[in-house]
Image (spheres, coloured by chain):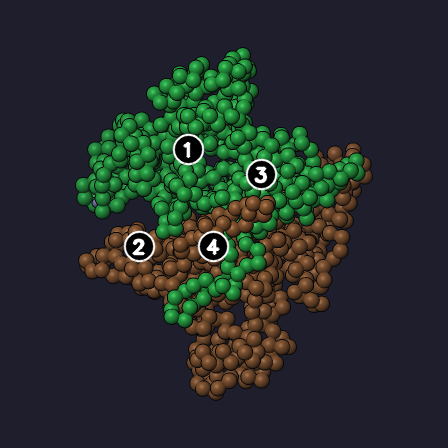
Chain colours: A green, B brown
């Protein structure tokens, strides 16, 4: 906690890197592209996992576990899938090391695999190969399974949480008897993600569909939620794919319908990853450190005693104990920091850096006056309040902080969502006031690609229930029926 | 559910394989040695995880996440460690596939790693390389971290849950300022495991230390819990290692003590894996299927309606609803199976196979008589009871089943723990009445090795607080001060 952070305005990217380090969230490991998620960072991820896991179970899903490795031949079975992932695969070729006789450990060439194994970048292929054995009749459907796992996509340029070679995620893989049911599932899970983003991460998101260019490799339709970061760049926070019958056909998975016909099974897959940690960090935090929505904060309240001598500390601790038990009774997580090795000012800065939503400070004068100092992290304001009903006050304050953080992010997005009607305007906005730029587009991949090359902006999504409006493409002037959301993105 | 199981007496190993398949717990995947953990099997593992995770947190540990891959050079840094794992490592050598031009996907030889990466078989090396950056002073100690992860140890002969190339586990890795504190931690975590085994898995365990031969590669002392399966073979259910300063020395991890001296850090590691699933299955189950201790059963109670026509079903469902809400209010998990696609007899067999501890059946006559049929899985007995206070009755019954299963396993172990005073006796017991054989041993690796070669029995452990008794080694006749526990083992 020795030094502050580079400010966001000075260098946003540097600010992010320093924040991840100083808030003890994660660090680079000795393995290129692989991160270490530190205990404090991991405790936030655990909270996310537990909320999402419950949402998956509430929507009828069960967890299961599939192999880390995928035979190379499986990959090739779905053509667009292998195209999408082949260039970023970690490949296992041997299964033994040996001593070379002079003390060096080397790969044992006699232990070469007949068929190479790919460390899963995603599990559609191994899972659909498994589902083949699980599905005979319509009675075996739907299959609603989720997996929490690590995956590897080799990346040359990595950033902690946002883009790493190995990351943690969940991947849902469902199998259905009909097209309609699979699309319903795809949309249901998108809404689960959107609800999680908005009501837990306090992050407003655009719900939409990807263009063909940006679809998941092997999907007929990719739905996504897109969030806006404080630097005006978009971040894809979750995706839900309607896979049609592509994987069923690749792995020959058929079922006997009620009418006795043999039909291919319909599929979806959907996932969110530790990338959400990056979104959470970047969306709300400020130049003093992390700002966490109370619903995902591992420590919601910290109490710091400000005392002269151990006798006064004992008295303060007694009062603190009482407050702690009242807060805990309300299900609020609270930490009492009576370390003698650090001064209060140091502790204040540390909990600000770590984004603890509410800080309570208790001093000698508070003992006499029945008061307590209440500081909130989001606004960095503090006031001295009576200790009567302090647990109720804190409970309400946590709710207020949760909705304030959301509102702030929503206001920011509203301010930074702008319509552009000419390509000139479009480029100017991207440079001067980056955010979502809503513009007409002629619907072709060529135009999309040209815009990307010329401006680095991509179509983040075609919003669901998009307003229909006659217009002309900002680049080609061809007719368009709706605006789509462009942005530069993580 | 079409056919029953091979009986245990006929072929124990075949019984196990069939049970794992028919109870829907796991299956082999297309990848040699890697398993698919099916939703029902995984839901049991999730219960284990949640109990253990809470116990780890209650003893002061936090979770974190470290990379899947370990640079080959890290492995070589602790000599006995690399000896222990080198021959069973999955090695990543390339990071890209490519199309060979004629439509085949092949490894891209231009994407060869400079240094090969090992898929972690355990994480001491990568973690201690990380801890080096976390530890400067005694104030940074202890570090009490756990990781839930997948690991890979290449195995030629695999069995679902018991020995698989990839498995799921947790691995605790702690760092301490003193030898004493590290030993205390090692023993504390052994006791956490023993408590979990006995009070949750309902599995009595021997607590002990491994001999030098059987120690973890890199440990000064390996503590273990050993359980006895129904075929008289032992199964190591958890280990806790005192690593001394071996890894601190290998990775140069020193701290400044309170006295201002530079000292090497002391380490422990401890783990349990999906192997516990194998132990759970084999310890209690019978020829009708799985027997689960209620505390780990995903479904504790199933209610099956036995009805003629939909009108009667409606009346039964009303009564069932009332019972369900009363059971749920007590925190008991309950499933109501009113599927019309299967007969009651089929359902009964299915829930027996899956080890649901209590089955309630409600028929038309029960409606009039205010009764219900209560069947318990462990004893396979049933009786018709009044529905008054049925929730209390079931709650008590679940506790009774939990302790009955434990007692049964304990009685079995007592009967099958036998003293042998001659090598003749020792061998006869192993063949005729396998179990733990308590015998005097001269303390040498040579004798231990000879016994293993001649009888396939190994020293499972030297029990903690072992009774001291003068005797002579059954093989060499040399003096011995205590008996140790031998067994054939999984
Ligand atoms: Zn003090
Ligand atoms: Zn019916």
Let me know if residue A203 appears in the view: no
Q: Chain of mark 4?
A: B
Instruction: Name the residue carrying label 2.
Output: B132
Nearer-the-camera pick, B104 or A247:
B104
Q: Which circle, 1 or 3, is nearer the viewer? A: 3
Mark 4 vs 2, N-terminal side: 4
Instruction: Name the residue carrying label 1.
Output: A490
Mark 1 vs 3, N-terminal side: 3
Q: Residue at x 42, y 68 (%)?
A: A100
Q: Label 4 near label 1: C-beta < 8 Å?
A: no
Instruction: Name the residue carrying label 4.
Output: B92
Q: Which circle, 3 or 4, is nearer the viewer? A: 3
| Disc 2 secondary structure class | helix
Q: Residue at x 62, y 39 (%)?
A: A174
Q: Are marks 1 and 4 on the same chain?
A: no
Q: Position of residue A5 (x, y in %)?
A: 26, 35
The residue positioned farthest toward the front in the image shown = B101
* Label 2 CB less than 8 angstroms from ligand 1: no
Q: Which circle, 1 or 2, is nearer the viewer? A: 1
Crowd class of label 4 (few under 14; some 14 to 19; many from 20; radius 10 Å): many
Q: Position of residue A416 (x, y in %)?
A: 39, 20
Instruction: Name the residue carrying label 3.
Output: A80
User: Would you place residue A73 above or below residue B422 in this image?
Assistant: above
User: Would you place residue A267 above or below residue B154 in this image?
Assistant: above
Nearer-the-camera pick, A424 or A309:
A424
Q: Are marks 4 and 2 on the same chain?
A: yes
Nearer-the-camera pick, A220 or A350:
A220
Where residue A201 sits, quadrant-wise, is top left
| Disc 1 secondary structure class | loop
Q: Label 2 near label 3: C-beta < 8 Å?
A: no
Q: Chain of mark 2?
A: B
């Amino acid at each position: 906690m020795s030094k502050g952070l580079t400010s966001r305005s000075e260098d946003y990217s540097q600010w992010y890197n320093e924040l991840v380090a100083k808030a003890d969230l994660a660090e680079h490991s000795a393995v290129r592209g692989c991160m270490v998620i530190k205990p404090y960072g991991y405790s936030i991820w655990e909270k996310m996992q537990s909320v999402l896991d419950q949402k998956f179970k509430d929507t009828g899903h069960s967890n299961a576990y599939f192999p880390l490795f995928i035979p190379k031949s499986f990959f090739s079975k779905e053509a667009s899938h292998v195209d999408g992932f082949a260039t970023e695969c970690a490949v296992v070729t041997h299964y033994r090391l040996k001593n070379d006789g002079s003390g060096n450990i080397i790969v044992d060439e006699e232990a070469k695999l007949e068929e190479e194994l790919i460390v899963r970048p995603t599990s559609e292929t191994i899972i659909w190969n498994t589902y083949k054995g699980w599905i005979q009749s319509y009675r075996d459907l739907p299959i609603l399974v989720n997996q929490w796992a690590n995956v590897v996509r080799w990346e040359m340029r990595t950033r902690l949480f946002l883009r790493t070679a190995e990351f943690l995620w969940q991947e849902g893989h469902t199998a259905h008897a009909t097209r309609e049911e699979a699309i319903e599932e795809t949309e249901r899970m998108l809404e689960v993600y959107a609800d999680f983003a908005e009501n837990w991460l306090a992050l407003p998101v655009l719900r939409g569909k990807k263009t063909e260019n940006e679809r998941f490799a092997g999907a007929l339709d990719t739905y996504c939620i897109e969030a806006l970061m404080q630097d005006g760049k978009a971040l894809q926070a979750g995706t839900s794919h309607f896979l049609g019958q592509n994987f069923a056909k690749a792995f020959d998975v058929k079922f006997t319908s009620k009418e006795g016909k043999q039909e291919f099974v319909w599929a979806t897959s959907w996932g969110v990853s530790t990338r959400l940690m990056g979104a959470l960090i970047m969306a709300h935090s400020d130049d003093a450190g992390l700002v966490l929505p109370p619903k995902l904060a591992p420590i919601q309240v910290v109490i710091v005693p400000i005392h002269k001598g151990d006798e006064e500390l004992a008295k303060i601790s007694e009062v603190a104990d009482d407050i702690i038990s009242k807060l805990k009774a309300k299900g609020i997580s609270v930490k009492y920091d009576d370390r003698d090795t650090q001064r209060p000012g140091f502790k204040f800065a540390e909990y600000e850096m770590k984004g603890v939503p509410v800080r309570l400070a208790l001093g000698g004068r508070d003992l006499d006056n029945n008061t307590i100092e209440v500081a909130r992290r989001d606004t960095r304001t503090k006031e001295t309040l009576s200790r009567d009903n302090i647990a109720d006050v804190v409970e309400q304050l946590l709710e207020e902080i949760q909705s304030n953080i959301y509102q702030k992010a929503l206001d920011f997005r509203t301010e930074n969502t702008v319509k552009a009607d000419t390509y000139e305007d479009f480029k100017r906005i991207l440079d001067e006031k980056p955010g979502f730029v809503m513009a007409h587009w002629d619907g072709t991949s060529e135009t999309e690609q040209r815009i990307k090359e010329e401006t680095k902006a991509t179509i983040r999504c075609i919003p669901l229930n998009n307003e229909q409006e006659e217009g002309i493409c900002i680049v080609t002037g061809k007719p368009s029926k709706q605006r789509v959301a462009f942005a530069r993105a993580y």
